[in-house]
Amino acid sequence: MTMIPIPLVLHDVLGKQQTRSSLLLISAAVAIALLAMAPALADIAPWRSVLAALLIVDIAAGAIANLTAGTNEHYATRSPSRWVFLAVHVHLPVLALLLGAPLTPALIAWAATIAGGVIVNLLAGRAVQRVAAGVVFGAILCVLPILPDQEPTLLIVSSLFAFKVVYAFAVDHRADSRKGEVQHESTARSA
């Protein structure tokens, strides 16, 4: 598997290196998200559309990139960066303002997602982390559609944002792969 070095300016998004297939999948996620959001982006001023598109690109790219070994390794070895990541992700309220969507559901979705990301991040190194992330993500998905004034456009992006932050980012996927390797080695030894 050939690893492609990533420019330093993109390390926080893609890590130090990525495979071609991961980059292709990340690009596909971005394209799908932009296509889904195109009608909403077409209805606003061009400058707002560009800024909103950049936030959508970051959310879609991160939802997939955070699952990759390159990005996961980048954050798994930089604990302070994990907290900065959570602190700077104010995407949903800003996106709601740019799209002219109601702010209340965006604020609730954002607060629930960041709180969920914090909880899951605090469980780093514990076997329950991935399961807890699934529960938190599922709870957020159950609440998002019933928020007052929720718009379909923001519902889609909020769901993707929750996946990005709570499951793809906050879970140390490297720990899962190491456990699998250890189990594989112990099974091979006992055979």
Image (tube, rainbow, N blue to C red):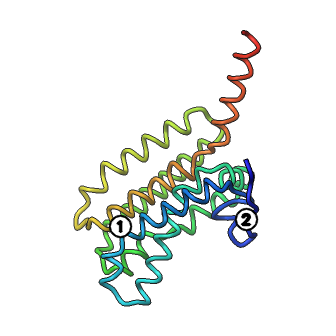
Label 2 residue SS: loop
Mark number for residue 106?
none
Q: Circle 1: is it few (<14), some (14-19), or many (20+) Cα within 10 Å?
A: some
Label 1 residue SS: helix
Q: Earlier in the sequence, mark 1 or mark 2?
A: 2
Left or right of residue 177: residue 156: left
- The residue located at (30%, 83%) in the rendering is 43
Q: Where in the figure is residue 32, as x and y percent of width and height?
A: 42, 63
- The residue located at (53%, 48%) in the rendering is 119
Task: Look at the picture and state if 55 lies above or below 67.
Answer: below
Left or right of residue 131: residue 7: right
Q: Nearer the viewer, residue 108 or 14?
A: 14
Gap between marks 1 and 2, in whole Å? Answer: 28 Å
Q: Which residue is mark 2?
A: 6
Indicate the quadrant where residue 66 lies.
bottom right
Mark number for residue 36?
1
